[in-house]
Amino acid sequence: KAGVTQTPRYLIKTRGQQVTLSCSPISGHRSVSWYQQTPGQGLQFLFEYFSETQRNKGNFPGRFSGRQFSNSRSEMNVSTLELGDSALYLCASGRGDLGNTIYFGEGSWLTVV
Amino acid sequence: DQQVKQNSPSLSVQEGRISILNCDYTNSMFDYFLWYKKYPAEGPTFLISISSIKDKNEDGRFTVFLNKSAKHLSLHIVPSQPGDSAVYFCASYVNSGGSNYKLTFGKGTLLTVNP
């Protein structure tokens, strides 16, 4: 069974640009969560989508947005990029039940210059 | 919000010895905890979980202990191997309003196992 797939793996953007990251969950999983990892900050929760609806949202500015499609694939978008947005962005999928395990993709490394 | 705290940023042990990684939480909204391991430049990998109906869960060299009265859990790795060198995160479900929960992670502990 294929794991969680994230694209692109690496990208470099300029301040002020926008970026879209993609995530394909494990087959049968309806929940997709996004996390940001920066040095010393652990994994910061961005948002979670379940059945095409945003179910949870972390404490990030409105420049960070996402969506989920009917096939459970998800995208996240960051507009007006800032240097501080440089991070590893991780997508995780799960069944969506409370207490279930989520499984991560390899992540997308974003560098903003 | 439930806070998940890993107070030790790093831990160094000798190969073959026991590694003990600790995690504290501040309330009991939902007593289900998970441990993930992360190598540099890779996504976190699920290791082991435990629910409040148990105080111990074991999987091979990995054992997680839950002390509900102390709001403390620990991950034991015995024997430790150099390949276990990674960052370990504990995580818990936190109520985010109504019936919604989000999985919240600690800041991680970097384990180094020396040959």
Image (cartoon, coloured by chain):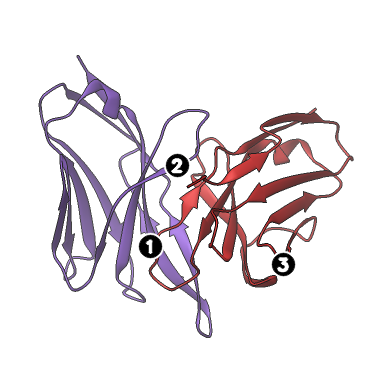
Chain colours: A red, B purple
Residue A70 numbered tag: 3
Q: Which residue is found at the position 13% from the left and 64% from the top? A: B55
Q: Position of residue B24 (x, y in %)?
A: 28, 57
Pick whichever, B102 or A42, lies toward us: B102
Looking at the rendered structure, whether the residues under marks 2 and 3 are on a common chain is answered as no
What chain does badge 1 belong to? B
* Pointer 1 local density, CA inside 10 Å: few below 14, some 14–19, many at least 20: many
Q: Nearer the viewer, residue A51 or A99?
A: A51
Q: Amino acid at mark 1?
A: Ser
Nearer to the camera, A71 or B66: A71
**Mark in front: 2 vs 3:** 3
Q: Position of residue B74 (x, y in %)?
A: 20, 51
**Nearer to us: label 3 or label 1:** 3
- The residue wearing badge 2 is B44
Q: Residue furthest bottom?
A: B98
Of labels 2 and 1, earlier in sequence is 2
Instruction: Report the side of A112 relative to A41 (left or right).
Output: right
Viewer-closest of A71 and B6: A71
User: Mark 2 falls within which chain?
Assistant: B
- Cα distance in 3D space between marks 3 and 1: 28 Å
Q: Which residue is mark 1?
A: B92
3D distance between C-alphas at marks 2 and 1:
15 Å
- Three-letter code, disc 3: Ser
- Quadrant for the C terminus of chain B, please: top left
In percent of width and height, residue B30 lies at: 35, 74
Residue B2 lies in quadrant: bottom left
Q: CA distance from mark 2 to mark 3?
A: 26 Å
Q: Would you place residue B67 above or below residue B46 in this image?
A: below
